[in-house]
Image (tube, helix red, strand yellow):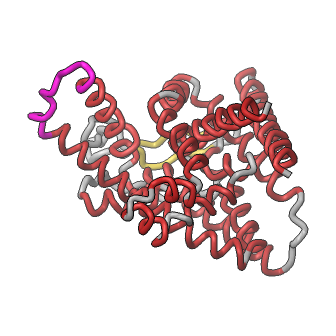
């Protein structure tokens, strides 16, 4: 019975990774929200901050089993396995859905954000001047970010490394969308679409025995970009986790209030009813990035009119709320089981 339960827990952990990976790729949605609502956020941050000097000492001394146990390797390994699989499966499905059913996808995520706000605030009883200020500050930052104009694409490797550090904010800070930050930095398509597609094509070529890609300078450059981005992401993940672990220990209520503010502020990014505004040149033509895709300048938000489509979108908002409530219910059951 115990082995069955353990296998079940492992499967659910991979599913959580799938959900985090998919959420991280969608602009305006934070994988950290999934971790927070599903009840494993603090374990996630604690496990990441175990990647420290002691861990590297164990690794370099060849004590691999001790290293694995020290960093909570089973937990992190299964979670990241889910995230990696997500980038080549679930996130691909999401890309398709956003292109073809954009309103309903954003409506679902909007509902999930609303549900997350309810989840975080329902048992929070430490409201005072400091926590209310932190809530308002987090909300202001979240709203302010949503109205910034995106920059142009930049594949300079130092800048890509910086993008990697910033992009993992969505995993460690619920409500702070790393993918949306990448849009603002101008590198969302380069780092989360084009480079991932290049990696997928390269892996496919390797398994089919075709190594002609080594002569393709553009593909090699893209693989370098992806490698530097990944290195930056790992650096940011470990760095942020150490900072957040300290803050959660010493300023937990203020941190939770700020996170709630970030999530409230992110509602502006995922507002379902918006029109995409693309960058235009002086002749009125679209400005394209290196892959030939139109560069997003901003979003024009509006209130919907009463229509069948609007009612369906509202139904999807309710669905999003129910998804979060389901995650909350599962998180509570998991914590009770561990207790």
Does 178 sit left or right of 269 as displayed? Answer: left
**Nearer to the camera, 299 or 243:** 243
Left or right: 254 with respect to 183? right
Name the residue at 71% across, 47% down.
113
Residue 183 percent coordinates (x, y): 44, 50
Residue drawn at x 43%, y 57% is: 234
Where residue 102 appears, x then y in whole percent? 57, 30
- Total of numbered circles in the picture? 0
Corner quadrant of residue 310: top right
Q: Is residue 56 left or right of residue 264?
A: left
> Depth check: 105 or 158 in front?
158
Q: Position of residue 294 (x, y in %)?
A: 35, 38
Q: Say if the magenta span includes residue 76.
A: no
In this view of the protein, can residue 272 be seen by the observer? Answer: no
Residue 162 seen in the figure: yes
Q: Which residues are magenta?
A: 206-217
Q: Is residue 192 above or below residue 95?
A: below
Please state if 175 lies on the left or on the right of 90 as rendered. Answer: right
Query: In the rendered image, which quarter is residue 273 located in?
Result: top right
Q: Residue at x 9, y 34 (%)?
A: 215
Q: Nearer the viewer, residue 286 or 266?
A: 266
| Vertical side of 110 occupied by 157: above or below | below
Residue at the outermost left position: 215
Residue 150 percent location from the top left of the image: 41, 54
Q: Residue at x 24, y 26 (%)?
A: 206
* Image quadrant where one finds the N terminus: top right
Name the image quarter holding residue 132.
bottom right
């Amino acid at each position: 019975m115990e082995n069955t339960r353990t296998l079940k827990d492992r499967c659910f952990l991979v599913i959580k990774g799938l959900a985090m990976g998919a959420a991280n790729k969608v602009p305006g949605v934070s994988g950290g929200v999934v971790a927070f609502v599903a009840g494993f956020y603090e374990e996630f941050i604690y496990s990441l901050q175990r990647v420290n000097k002691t861990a590297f000492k164990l690794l370099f001394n060849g004590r691999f089993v001790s290293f694995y146990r020290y960093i909570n390797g089973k937990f992190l390994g299964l979670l990241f396995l889910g995230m990696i699989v997500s980038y080549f499966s679930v996130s691909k499905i999401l890309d398709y859905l956003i292109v073809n059913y954009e309103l309903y996808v954003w409506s679902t995520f909007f509902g999930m954000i609303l549900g997350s706000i309810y989840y975080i605030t329902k048992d929070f009883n430490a409201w005072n001047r400091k926590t209310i200020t932190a809530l308002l500050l987090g909300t202001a930052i979240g709203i302010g970010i949503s109205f910034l104009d995106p920059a142009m694409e930049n594949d300079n490797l130092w800048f890509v490394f910086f993008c990697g550090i910033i992009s993992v904010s969505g995993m460690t800070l619920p409500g702070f969308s790393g993918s949306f930050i990448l849009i603002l930095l101008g590198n969302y398509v380069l780092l989360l679409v084009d480079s991932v597609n290049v990696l997928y094509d390269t892996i496919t070529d390797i398994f089919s025995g075709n190594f002609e890609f080594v002569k393709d300078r553009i593909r090699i450059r893209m693989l370098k970009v992806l490698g530097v981005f990944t290195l930056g992401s790992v650096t940011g993940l470990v760095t942020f986790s150490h900072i957040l672990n300290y803050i959660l220990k010493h300023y937990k209520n203020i941190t939770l209030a700020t996170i709630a503010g970030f999530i409230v502020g992110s509602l502006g990014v995922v507002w379902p009813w918006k029109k995409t505004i693309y960058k235009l040149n002086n002749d009125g033509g679209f400005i394209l990035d290196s892959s030939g895709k139109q560069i997003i300048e901003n979003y024009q938000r509006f209130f919907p009119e009463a229509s069948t489509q609007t009612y369906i979108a509202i139904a999807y908002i309710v669905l999003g709320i129910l998804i979060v409530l389901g995650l909350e219910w599962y998180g509570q059951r998991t914590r009770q089981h561990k207790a």
